[in-house]
Amino acid sequence: MEKIASFSVDHRFINEKIYISRIDGDITTYDVRMRKPNTGDVMSNALMHSFEHLFATFMRNSDIAENVIYVGPMGCQTGFYLLVRNACHEEVLSEVKKVLEKISVYNGAMPGASEIECGNYQNLDTALAKEEAARYLQKIKDQTENDLTYETGEK
């Protein structure tokens, strides 16, 4: 069986930033890495769930909304995948930063926070998502499109 792309990256060198995970035709998968892997610092389910509701909602209402295909959590609890069609890397990175800023100051109701809209609607906390958005934005605020490749540890 072939090894999938995300298992081919040396996770010892992944830091808290955004990476291009893979490009398949016109679809780019971004690794939105919010925690350094294998350090024990993982996001709780409540945090991931809350952040996912806001991040997905804001990305699907952003300037690149028509190109967003998927926003979803990593099982390892260290980040999210963002799949985008036909968008330049600079534009995606800029939009992610704008969305993080919007989430960090958001004072509205949690999107999808009802029994009708969500399978675990009681496990949502806007304050957790806001705090995480502000924390992560500080980590990536100076990142540029020239800094989207995985580190290898080689010098």
Image (tube, helix red, strand yellow):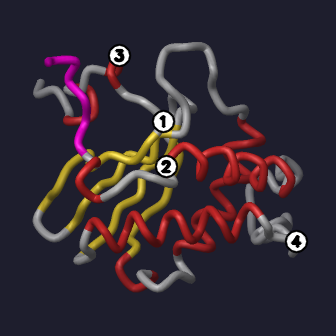
Q: Secondary structure at mark 1?
A: loop
Amino acid identity at mark 2: Ile
33 in relation to 131, above or below:
above
Q: Which mark is residue 154?
A: none
**Label 4 belongs to which residue?**
107
Q: Which secondary structure dominates the residues rendered in magenta?
A: loop
Residue 112: image location, x then y, percent = 76, 69
| Quadrant occupied by the C terminus | top left
Amino acid identity at mark 4: Asn
**Label 1 belongs to which residue?**
16
Q: Are marks 3 and 4 in contact (CB under 8 Å)?
A: no
- Sequence order check: which comes first, mark 4 or mark 2? 4
| Depth check, front residue: 91 or 123 | 91
Q: Are marks 1 and 2 in contact (CB under 8 Å)?
A: yes
- Sequence order check: which comes first, mark 1 or mark 2? 1
The residue positioned 46% from the left and 85% from the top of the image is 63
Amino acid identity at mark 3: Arg
Q: Point out the stretch of residues depicted in magenta.
A: 149-155
| Quadrant occupied by the N terminus | top left
36 in relation to 126, above or below:
above
**CA–CA distance between discs 4 and 2?**
23 Å
User: Does residue 92 appear left or right of residue 80 in this picture?
Assistant: left
| Depth check, front residue: 139 or 67 | 139
Amino acid identity at mark 1: Glu
58 in relation to 45, above or below:
below
Within 10 angstroms of label 3, few (less than 14), some, or many (20 or more) residues? Answer: few
Residue 107: image location, x then y, percent = 87, 71
